[in-house]
Image (spheres, grey):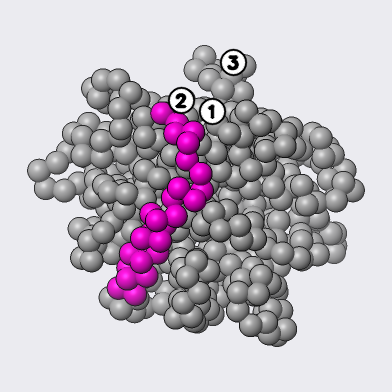
């Protein structure tokens, strides 16, 4: 990756302004063409959003996007859309015990609403605020209860594959537990036993760092620092680690780049959150120094791997070990080519990774200035690439905002245009949402507005 160290947040302001103009029209188009509130749109096919029957993890991104649009522009239409649709469609997801996605579905909707109200972005109403707080407490407890115990009083929130499965994606659902903890909530288990939500947050992060983010020390012969595996499998009989696996990557020993991006962003924002947690609340899970050290190493290793395994403009191909990458030649020495005939890029991974790089840079400003500058430059380089064609969708006929996103390459779910051999030209609901989220983050930095966190002010 060729990092442009001259970039500042304000350098991207004209591109970000254009993004919000395009974004407003696309949100309006989606709500006009898809008027069923519970329709969990996933990705576009020939430029039009469609559903995919797997889980409904993208519904929060659909309505959360409207709330981000309001946050950026203060256009009340998008506040009312996001608020109304949250109440109409998101209720069943508050108590969805079958998924690991509450950080996506609930924090993107109820969480954004609570944050915006607390920030004074719209009028405060004590009963409405209490509604959002109660919803987020419920979500946090439901998510924390989806727990697999491991040896040594450790454990993790298991994926929808079952109690044996730890997904890297779930690092970002820890936001739900974090908000619940800040609201003073706990999980009550059998016999009324209280379980601190922050304990499970830290334990899940530790399991993810230990089993899914390689430290390069030789757990397997392919060990490289920062290599991220999508899934780890455990024995439900004796609680021990068994093997690595993947659902959406090419191999357990390669790096599915969106999984890497989830780790980058998830660990970076949890480092920010842990700074706000009292020392005594971290004592039961090893203390502050141990927790921050674990998260910081995982975040830095993942970000360094990303920088070392993308194209020159910061856009990754879908998997760092994709089988036909070699046919592209020295792909890291040139900008990514979303129209190549061998392997697809994944712009959604880039959108998530950009925010991870920028947040880690902010966290390290006073701790490691050299790394902070490097990560900030990398994050702005990636975002700057995404905010321009061929990634920014400027066509009014296309419902997506971020082009060249890939969902599930191994299953062949992504549309391959006629005359081509790999997916390109389509969007995903999570890619669009995270491009908006990263743009909002940088916009606030450029304007010296309050720093954007998922939990908002106290």
Magenta stretch, residue numbers: 1-30
What separation in Å lies between label 3 and label 2 (alpha carbons)? 20 Å
- Please tell me which residue is depicted at 73% across the width and 42% down the height of the picture: 203
Is residue 9 positioned above or below 215 on the image? below
Residue depicted at x 47% and y 36%: 6
Q: Is residue 2 highlighted in magenta?
A: yes
Q: Nearer the viewer, residue 320 or 100?
A: 320
Q: Quadrant of the C terminus?
A: bottom right
Q: Residue at left 44%, top 55%?
A: 13
Q: What is the CA distance from the residue labelled 1 to the residue labelled 2? A: 6 Å
Looking at the picture, tell me which residue is in the foreground, 382 or 101.
382
Q: Which residue is outermost to the left?
A: 419
Q: For the residue carrying disc 2, how many other residues have a C-alpha within 10 Å: few (<14), some (14-19), or many (20+)?
A: some
* Numbered badge on residue 308: 2
Q: Secondary structure at mark 3?
A: loop
User: First in sequence: mark 3 or mark 2?
Assistant: 3
Q: Which residue is mark 1?
A: 304
Q: Are marks 1 and 3 in contact (CB under 8 Å)?
A: no
Image coordinates of residue 276 in percent, x first then y, are: 78, 52
Of the numbered discs in the image, which one, if any, rests on residue 218? 3
Spatial CA distance of label 1 from label 3 is 18 Å
Q: Nearer the viewer, mark 3 or mark 2?
A: 2
Q: Residues within 10 Å of mark 3 (few under 14, many from 20)?
A: few
Contact between labelled residues 2 and 1, with CB atoms less than 8 Å apart:
yes
């Amino acid at each position: 990756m060729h990092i442009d160290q001259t970039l500042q947040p304000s350098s991207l302001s004209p591109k970000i302004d254009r993004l919000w103009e395009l974004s407003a029209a696309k949100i309006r188009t989606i709500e006009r063409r898809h008027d069923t509130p519970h329709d969990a749109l996933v990705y576009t096919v020939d430029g039009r959003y469609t559903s995919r029957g797997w889980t409904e993890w993208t519904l929060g991104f659909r309505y959360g996007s409207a709330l981000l649009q309001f946050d950026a522009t203060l256009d009340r239409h998008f506040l009312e859309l996001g608020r109304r649709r949250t109440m109409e469609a998101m209720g069943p997801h508050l108590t969805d015990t079958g998924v690991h996605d509450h950080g996506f579905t609930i924090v993107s909707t109820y969480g954004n609403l609570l944050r915006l109200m607390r920030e004074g972005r719209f009028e405060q109403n004590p009963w409405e605020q209490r509604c959002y707080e109660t919803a987020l407490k419920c979500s946090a407890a439901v998510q924390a209860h989806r727990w697999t115990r491991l040896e040594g009083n450790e454990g993790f929130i298991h994926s929808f594959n079952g109690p044996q499965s730890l997904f890297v994606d779930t690092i970002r659902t820890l936001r739900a537990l974090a908000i619940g903890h800040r609201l003073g909530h706990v999980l009550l288990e059998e016999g009324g036993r209280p379980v601190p939500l922050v304990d499970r947050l830290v334990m899940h992060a530790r399991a993810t760092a230990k089993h899914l983010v390689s430290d390069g020390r030789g757990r397997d012969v392919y060990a490289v620092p920062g290599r991220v595996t999508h899934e780890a499998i455990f024995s439900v009989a004796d609680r021990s680690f068994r093997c690595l696996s993947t659902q959406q990557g090419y191999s357990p020993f390669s790096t599915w780049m969106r999984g890497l991006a989830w780790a980058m962003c998830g660990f970076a924002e949890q480092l920010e959150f842990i700074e706000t947690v009292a020392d005594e609340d971290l004592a039961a899970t090893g203390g502050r120094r141990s927790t921050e050290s674990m998260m910081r190493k995982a975040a830095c290793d993942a970000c360094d791997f990303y920088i070392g395994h993308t194209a020159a403009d910061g856009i990754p191909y879908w998997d760092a070990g994709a089988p036909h990458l070699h046919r592209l030649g020295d792909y890291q020495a040139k900008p990514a080519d979303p129209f190549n005939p061998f392997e697809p890029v994944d712009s959604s991974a880039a959108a998530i990774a950009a925010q991870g790089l920028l947040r880690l840079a902010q966290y390290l400003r006073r701790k490691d200035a050299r790394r902070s500058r490097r990560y900030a430059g990398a994050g702005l380089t990636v975002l700057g690439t995404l905010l321009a064609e061929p990634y920014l969708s400027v066509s009014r006929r296309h419902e997506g905002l971020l082009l060249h996103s890939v969902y599930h390459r191994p299953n062949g779910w992504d549309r391959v245009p006629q005359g081509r051999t790999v997916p390109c030209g389509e969007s995903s609901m999570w890619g669009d949402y995270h491009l908006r989220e990263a743009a909002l983050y940088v916009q606030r930095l450029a304007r010296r507005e309050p720093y954007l966190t998922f939990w908002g002010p106290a």
